[in-house]
Each structure stands twice: as structure tokens, then as C-alpha cells.
């Protein structure tokens, strides 16, 4: 034991008033769960590797917190990465990172579960482990160190973080987490070694134990193969999914200080059938599984009763595609309207019916209306498989302005290698056209906020073969837009091209990048997601010291038969499907919504038994006949 | 419409929650209790509430007071019953009363606040000598001015100090300071300023507001 909870508490008292927002570091919020430590066999710390303000509202961790604490033999507590002032203060006072609930040092836990939704949290993960005084490298951890596990979207290519994480969760965490807890319990009661525990974890569907595999590289630096180091462990790691979304969490922790989202979040469906080719989430969270309206409405009610929050967010990747969206919106507005409650429904399709939906939910307080056309020319729309015509966009914009909104946020994406300057100019043209539409309807009050992000080719998507745009080219495109998108009523923001490079290195990186991440962190990289903290120089130096060429990971058009470092991670969507979809993008061929027709992405054969057990409309994949029924027919 | 006054203690981790966030905590408490908080009119309706005088971050308090407006009216018993289940950790309700709608705002009624500062049990703090402390108190109380600087402005702290004494309880670890400072609008004595004037490390003591004195 590093320090007892009482010692940690005592030292904290001395430093808390010297740092900004000390409320981040004390826990004690409504609905936090405190269990008698000594009477519980398994202790899990759930960590979001950024500050409390961002981590507390994270829905994934809220789900795990509730499902773990529902077990009598498990306690789950939370930790976040402190802000810089607190990191310094803690190091000075020799306070190890601790859990907010019981103030136990993180080393005292059996399992540390880290949420890694995006790559810019990687260096912070090292910062967190270091602050917790846990060896950074998996290979350096001993029998008494906690098991370090990680999950979240960025782990669909786990390789870059492989040296630091003992086991990755691939897919939905809800089911796998219990299997992992059970394996750890068996390991503790049977007194098996850490190595034996890791091997037993590797047998669980959806768990990847990187130390049991080793990559073999070709002379040109690409991967030759991923070799398993232990007999009997799976060659590929298939993701784990829940056939039916379990009941949504309703005992959200209510923060005692302001955080980024103060709200009840309900996932109305998981997955997306649209098949936008750049969209990582849309590819890796298949199949679509919907919740029913009653369950959603009841859980909102319970959650509001438990929390008193003044906002509810209905979350999904594409809200308009939820089968019962009208019914849901009616039920929600009827039940909860007029209570000084904001109901937000993000990710609406660009069509005027979305405005009707939104209007029904319009509370007394309202924000802007966000639309994401992503591309502005037909050629690019075909390429990315998101065909939204100019007319459709302008009509929707007109409907939005005429129903009382003054501001429309438009999201576009630049940086696909086949994009021309004409495609970029068209973005500016379209933003101006939307603003002109607004001027026609509400005059000078109309505003357009254009958010122009830069394309990052992601692993496990049809664009995993594609090269990333260069910094110079991105800058030229942004400069062009900056010139065009100025003047009254128009706001424009963009992504730092250097951050785009970082995301691109890491999202399609191999295991050698673990060393780069370590070196970059050593050289001071942390809080990469924070504009003011991002340290590109440290990353450049890290690549140099590791003897790796960053361009190898970003600017190389990858050959169609290249073996990728993430090929052994099976998200259910097959590589041959992705390849076919990539070829279609080159030919500018659209693939329609797969609710209309199944394109055999691989999910259905991969999870056929689960589909059979969950018949009906909650999945959007075609129905599978019961095994018995097939036999009867023949 | 009715106006109710809640007397409560602020304890535990909530002492690191600032004043505006406390408003939010109360709003949510009322929402959980399903009590009909009255909201302001306009584009961004806010719940109608009014707090006596803000408590500096890090202090606990046995004397917090906040007013709420409800619409429609309920009996005090109904309100008590509803709130009992809903208060979050760190808030302990002491009393709830209905007050006249026409009563002036709470902060205009408070004239002084009483505090108690006790040393946190940190070993390295023990060597602060109690003798010196007692001497300094005498010095301050017998002086007519106590020049201090707050946010680059010079001012005289002395008139804000209404009372100051050491409560004798043996060694310094269990000794505490008791003091009364003015808390009128525009004339609020700051506990941390007084401690600094006494040469006490403000991070070494735990300060609790124990009483608010009304006009």
C-alpha cells in the first residue's frame, strides 16, 4: 500500500485550496457508490484519462459503473487525470492518483478500466499510470499490480497502446467486463500467476491480450504477420456485442461543480446503417440495435427522479434513423415538456422533417441547429457515401431559419486525397448559400457557423488504405476557406493540421508506436486533445528517437493486399467488404442504407446465433430463421 | 407564490463547491423533490433563489441560509417531507420557514458572520507557537488600523474585525480561533485575510462559518 485513504485525504486537505476547481478532486457527489472496501472481493477503478469535467459525463463509464456496482461482490470507483496544477501539487505532496469515492490509491485496486474513445488520450493514459505509481509497461508489472484494461472506439486498432495495456476490450463493454471480473476472481481464489490470468482472459470473446502476440515485419516496414506466442489462443479476436441493449443507466452521478454536459444521456440505438465511408463509429458499432420507446421514456423518468438534471440527451449515431423516432419524440415531449427541461436530439438527418422533430422538443432554452453535410460536391459525396444534395440542404436550412433558429452550424470535412481545390471552394460556396437563404428569411440575424474538420483515415473503415493529406495541403485548403468564409454572419473554425497528423499516426499505427507514445510523453506530451497543451515538437522528436518515419503511417497509400496491424481484430465487418466499399468509393458508386438491403458486411454471419436469439425489428439486419425452422422446410 | 427560507449546514466534500454551483445543487434538489420552483421570465428562465452571503471555497458552514420562491404554495410540512429524501450529501437541512414575500433580500439583512478556525492535524504545523498567536491577537485588537492589500488595493481590515479570541483547549492542535467579521454589503471581512494578518497559513486550518448575525 502506497498511502492509506486517510493519509491521502490528509495530504489532499493541504493542497486542494491551492488548485483551480478543487471540486474535481473530492468526489462525494450525489449517487456516487461507496461500498465497504474490506467486505468486497473485487475492486475496479474506472478511469477517463482526461479531467473530471470531461470524464464525468462519459456515458460508457456510467454504464460500467452502474453494472459493476450492481454486483454484490464488486465495487467500482472513479478516477480522472487531474489538471496540470493538481498534477504538480500531487507530485510535490507525493500523493498517488486515488479514487474519488474511497480515496484508495489506484494501485490498491484489482482492475483499472480505462476508457479510450480517441487517440489524443494516449499520452494522458501514461500520465495517469505514472501518477498512480503503476509501472507503465505491461511487461514490468508484477503479481501484485492491478490488471490494466482498456476499451472504447480507439481500441479497434489496439496496437499503438499494446505495450501499456494488459488486455483490451473489443466491442461492447457491458458483457465482457463481467467475464473479466470473473476471471480475475478465479485467479485470486486459485492463486494463479499473472501470466495464467492473461491467458485465461485471452479465451474470452472480445478480449485481446497483446503480450500473447508478437508482430513480424517485412523489410519495408509493413506487417508480415501477427504471431501468437501461446498455444491455443485465438488467431483473430472477435468483438463482443450485446444482442439486446441492456437497461440504460439511471443513477447518473450528479456533479457538484459545472462539467461539460450536465444531463441524463440515453442511448436510443447503437450502430448505424448509413455506411458513410469515413465514419469509424458507423463501421465498428454494427449491427444496429434499437431500444423500445417505453424503455427509453421510463428510463428518462427514473433518471430525472434520481438526478434532477435539467437536460436530457437522446443519443445515437443517426437519430432520424431510429425506427420509432416520431413516436419517441411525441412521447418524450408529452411527458416531459414544460418542466424547464432541455431535450437534445443530436445527429439529425438533413431534411425538413428533422426540423419538425426538433421543434417538438424545443424547450424554453434553445441552441443552434447542427447539420453535417460533410461534402459540397457530388463527386465527394459519392466518394464518402453521404449524398446530400444542395437543394436538400438549402430547403432544410430554409425550414430551420423560418422556424425561429438564427444560427445553423454546418460540419464539413476536408482532406480526402482525391479532393480538389474546387471541392474545397464548393464548401465555401455552400456555406454562403445557406447564409443567403437565412438572410432571405430572417435578414441580418441569420448566422452560419462552419466547422471544417480534417479527414483522418481510420483503421477498420473503407478508407483504411487511403493516404492522409499533407500539412501543407491542409493549410492551403484552410487558408482558402478562411478567405472565403469571413464577413458578417459567418464564423469558421478548423482543426490544427498537426493534431490531424497525430490522430492519423496513431489510428493506423502498429505496435512500434508504443515506443513513440512513451517517448513523446517523456518529452512532455500530454493533454494532446487540448489546443494549448498540444506539443507537436515532442512527437516529432519521439519519432526521430524511435527511428520511425511518421509519413510511413500517414502519407502512404497502402496496397490493397497489405496486411494491417489491426487485421487480427475482428469488428464483425470483413476486410473484403471494406475493400469492395473502398473500390466503390474510387468509382464514385453509392451504397444505400443497409436497412433497405443487406450488403453482407459480415455482421450477420459473424453474429448469426445472437440475431436468432434476438428476432424482430430491434436489429436492422435481416431476420434469421430459427435453426429448427430451416430443418422443417427442407 | 410563496417564499421559503432554508437554514442548512454545508459539510463534507461540498465545501469545495462554489456558490453558483450550490445554486444548481439546490435547483436539482427541488427538481428531484418535485417541488414547484418559480422561474424567472424571459429567454433563459432561472429559478428564483437568493442566498444570504457567499461562503468562500473550502470552508464548511453551520449557518447557511437560502430563500426560494415556490408557485403554487405548499405547507412547510409538505416541503420538509419532500426535501428530506432529496438533499445530496454535504447538505443538512436545519430548519425550513415560510417568510414574507415583501421581506428585503437576505444579503441586505446580514450584518456579521462568526467563524471558527481549527488546525488540521498535520504534524509539521504543530510548531506554530500559540504564545505568538495570542500576542498577535492582542496587538491587532489594540490597534486602530490593520493595513492589508486585497487585489492590489490597500485597505484597513481592522474595522471589519468585531471579535477575535483563542478558544483554549490545550495544545495548538486542538486550539481554535473564534472571530466575528462584518458581513455587510460592501464591507465584508474575509477570514483568510484575518488569518494572514495573524501569520497563520490559511491552508493549515479548517475554517467553519458558525453563525450569521442579522440586523
Image: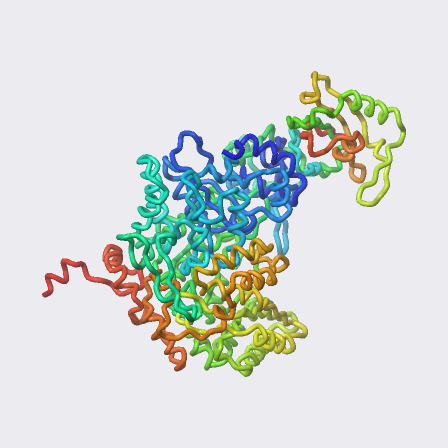
Looking at this view, name the residue that lies furthest to the front. A219
Q: Residue at x 29, y 69 (%)?
A: A600
Drawn side of residue A23 relative to residue A320, left or right: right
Q: Position of residue A375 (x, y in %)?
A: 50, 75
Instruction: State which quarter of the image contains the C terminus of chain A.
Output: bottom left
Looking at this view, name the residue that lies furthest to the right. B144
Q: Position of residue A139 (x, y in %)?
A: 43, 48
Instruction: Identify whether A280 is placed above or below A63.
Output: below
Q: Position of residue A285 (x, y in %)?
A: 38, 60
Q: Position of residue A275 (x, y in %)?
A: 39, 69
Q: Residue at x 51, y 70 (%)?
A: A551
Q: Quadrant of residue B196?
A: top right
Q: Quadrant of residue B207?
A: top right
Q: Quadrant of residue B155?
A: top right
Drawn side of residue A167 relative to residue A442, left or right: left
Instruction: Identify whether A166 is placed above or below A603.
Output: above
Amino acid at each position: 500500500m502506497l498511502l492509506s485513504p486517510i493519509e491521502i485525504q490528509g495530504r489532499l486537505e493541504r493542497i486542494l485550496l491551492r488548485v483551480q476547481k478543487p471540486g474535481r478532486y473530492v468526489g462525494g457527489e450525489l449517487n456516487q457508490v461507496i461500498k465497504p472496501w474490506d467486505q468486497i472481493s473485487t475492486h475496479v477503478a474506472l478511469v477517463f484519462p482526461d479531467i473530471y469535467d470531461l470524464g464525468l459525463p462519459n456515458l460508457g463509464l456510467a454504464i460500467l459503473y452502474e453494472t459493476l456496482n450492481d454486483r454484490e461482490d464488486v465495487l467500482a470507483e472513479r478516477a480522472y487525470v487531474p489538471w496540470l496544477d493538481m498534477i504538480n501539487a500531487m507530485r510535490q505532496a507525493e500523493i498517488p492518483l486515488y479514487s474519488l469515492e474511497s480515496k484508495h490509491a489506484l494501485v490498491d485496486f484489482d482492475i483499472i478500466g480505462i476508457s479510450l474513445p480517441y487517440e489524443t488520450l494516449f499520452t494522458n493514459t501514461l500520465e495517469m499510470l505514472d501518477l498512480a505509481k503503476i509501472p507503465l509497461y505491461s511487461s514490468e508489472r508484477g503479481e501484485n499490480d492491478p490488471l490494466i484494461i482498456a476499451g472504447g472506439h480507439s481500441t479497434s486498432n489496439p496496437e499503438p497502446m499494446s505495450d501499456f495495456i494488459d488486455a483490451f476490450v473489443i466491442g461492447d463493454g457491458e458483457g465482457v467486463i463481467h467475464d473479466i471480473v470473473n476471471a480475475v476472481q478465479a485467479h485470486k481464489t486459485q492463486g494463479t500467476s499473472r501470466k495464467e490470468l492473461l491467458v485465461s482472459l485471452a479465451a474470452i470473446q472480445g478480449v485481446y491480450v497483446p503480450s500473447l502476440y508478437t508482430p513480424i515485419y517485412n523489410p519495408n516496414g509493413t506487417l508480415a504477420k501477427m504471431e501468437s506466442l501461446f498455444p491455443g489462443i485465438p488467431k483473430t479476436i472477435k468483438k463482443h456485442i450485446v444482442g439486446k441493449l441492456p437497461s440504460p443507466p439511471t443513477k447518473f452521478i450528479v456533479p457538484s461543480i459545472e462539467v461539460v454536459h450536465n444531463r441524463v444521456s440515453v442511448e436510443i440505438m447503437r450502430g448505424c446503417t448509413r455506411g458513410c465511408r469515413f465514419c469509424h463509429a458507423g463501421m465498428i458499432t454494427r449491427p444496429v440495435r434499437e431500444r423500445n420507446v417505453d424503455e427509453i421514456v421510463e428510463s428518462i423518468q427514473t433518471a430525472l427522479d434520481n438526478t434532477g438534471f435539467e437536460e436530457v440527451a437522446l443519443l445515437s449515431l443517426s437519430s432520424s434513423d431510429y425506427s420509432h423516432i416520431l413516436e419517441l419524440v411525441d412521447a418524450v415531449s408529452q411527458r416531459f415538456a414544460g418542466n424547464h427541461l432541455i431535450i437534445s436530439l443530436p445527429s439529425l438527418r438533413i431534411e425538413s422533417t428533422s426540423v419538425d422533430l426538433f421543434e417538438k422538443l424545443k424547450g424554453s432554452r434553445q441552441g443552434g441547429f447542427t447539420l453535417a453535410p460533410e461534402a459540397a460536391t457530388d463527386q465527394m459525396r459519392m466518394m464518402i457515401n453521404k449524398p446530400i444534395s444542395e437543394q436538400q440542404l438549402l430547403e432544410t436550412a430554409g425550414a430551420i431559419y423560418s422556424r425561429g433558429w438564427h444560427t445553423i452550424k454546418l460540419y464539413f470535412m476536408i482532406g480526402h486525397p482525391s479532393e480538389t481545390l474546387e471541392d474545397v471552394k464548393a464548401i465555401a460556396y455552400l456555406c454562403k448559400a445557406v447564409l443567403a437563404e437565412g438572410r432571405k428569411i430572417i435578414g441580418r440575424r441569420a448566422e452560419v457557423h462552419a466547422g471544417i474538420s480534417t479527414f483522418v483515415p481510420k483503421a477498420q473503415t473503407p478508407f483504411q488504405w487511403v493516404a492522409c493529406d499533407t500539412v501543407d495541403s491542409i493549410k492551403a485548403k484552410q487558408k482558402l476557406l478562411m478567405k472565403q468564409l469571413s464577413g458578417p454572419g459567418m464564423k469558421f473554425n478548423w482543426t490544427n493540421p498537426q493534431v490531424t497528423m497525430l490522430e492519423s499516426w496513431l489510428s493506423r499505427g502498429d505496435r512500434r508506436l508504443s515506443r513513440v507514445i512513451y517517448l513523446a510523453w517523456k518529452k512532455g506530451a500530454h493533454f494532446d486533445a487540448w489546443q494549448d497543451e498540444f506539443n507537436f515538437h515532442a512527437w516529432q522528436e519521439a519519432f526521430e528517437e524511435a527511428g520511425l518515419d511518421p509519413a510511413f503511417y500517414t502519407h502512404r497509400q497502402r496496397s490493397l493486399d497489405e496486411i494491417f496491424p489491426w487485421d487480427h481484430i475482428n469488428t464483425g465487418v470483413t476486410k473484403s467488404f471494406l475493400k469492395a466499399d473502398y473500390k466503390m468509393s474510387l468509382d464514385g458508386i453509392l451504397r444505400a442504407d443497409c436497412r433497405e438491403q443487406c450488403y453482407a458486411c459480415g455482421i450477420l454471419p459473424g453474429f448469426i446465433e445472437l440475431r436468432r436469439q434476438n428476432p424482430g425489428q430491434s436489429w436492422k439486419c435481416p431476420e434469421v430463421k430459427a435453426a429448427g425452422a430451416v430443418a422443417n422446410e427442407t | 407564490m410563496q417564499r421559503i427560507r432554508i437554514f442548512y449546514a454545508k459539510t463534507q466534500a461540498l465545501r469545495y463547491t462554489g456558490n453558483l454551483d450550490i445554486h444548481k445543487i439546490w435547483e436539482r434538489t427541488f427538481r428531484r423533490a418535485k417541488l414547484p420552483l418559480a422561474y424567472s421570465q424571459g429567454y433563459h428562465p432561472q429559478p428564483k433563489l437568493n442566498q444570504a452571503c457567499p461562503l468562500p471555497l473550502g470552508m464548511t458552514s453551520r449557518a447557511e441560509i437560502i430563500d426560494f420562491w415556490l408557485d403554487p404554495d405548499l405547507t412547510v410540512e409538505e416541503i420538509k417531507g419532500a426535501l428530506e429524501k432529496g438533499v445530496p450529501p454535504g447538505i443538512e437541512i436545519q430548519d425550513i420557514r415560510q417568510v414574507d414575500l415583501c421581506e428585503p433580500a437576505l444579503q441586505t439583512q446580514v450584518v456579521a458572520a462568526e467563524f471558527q478556525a481549527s488546525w488540521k492535524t498535520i504534524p509539521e504545523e504543530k510548531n506554530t507557537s500559540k504564545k505568538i498567536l495570542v500576542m498577535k491577537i492582542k496587538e491587532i485588537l489594540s490597534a486602530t488600523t490593520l493595513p492589508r492589500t486585497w487585489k492590489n488595493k490597500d485597505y484597513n481590515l481592522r474595522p471589519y474585525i468585531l471579535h477575535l479570541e483563542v478558544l483554549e483547549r490545550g495544545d495548538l492542535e486542538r486550539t481554535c480561533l473564534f472571530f466575528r467579521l462584518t458581513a455587510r454589503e460592501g464591507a465584508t471581512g474575509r477570514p483568510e485575510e484575518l488569518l494572514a494578518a495573524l501569520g497563520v497559513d490559511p491552508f493549515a486550518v479548517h475554517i467553519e462559518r458558525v453563525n450569521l448575525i442579522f440586523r
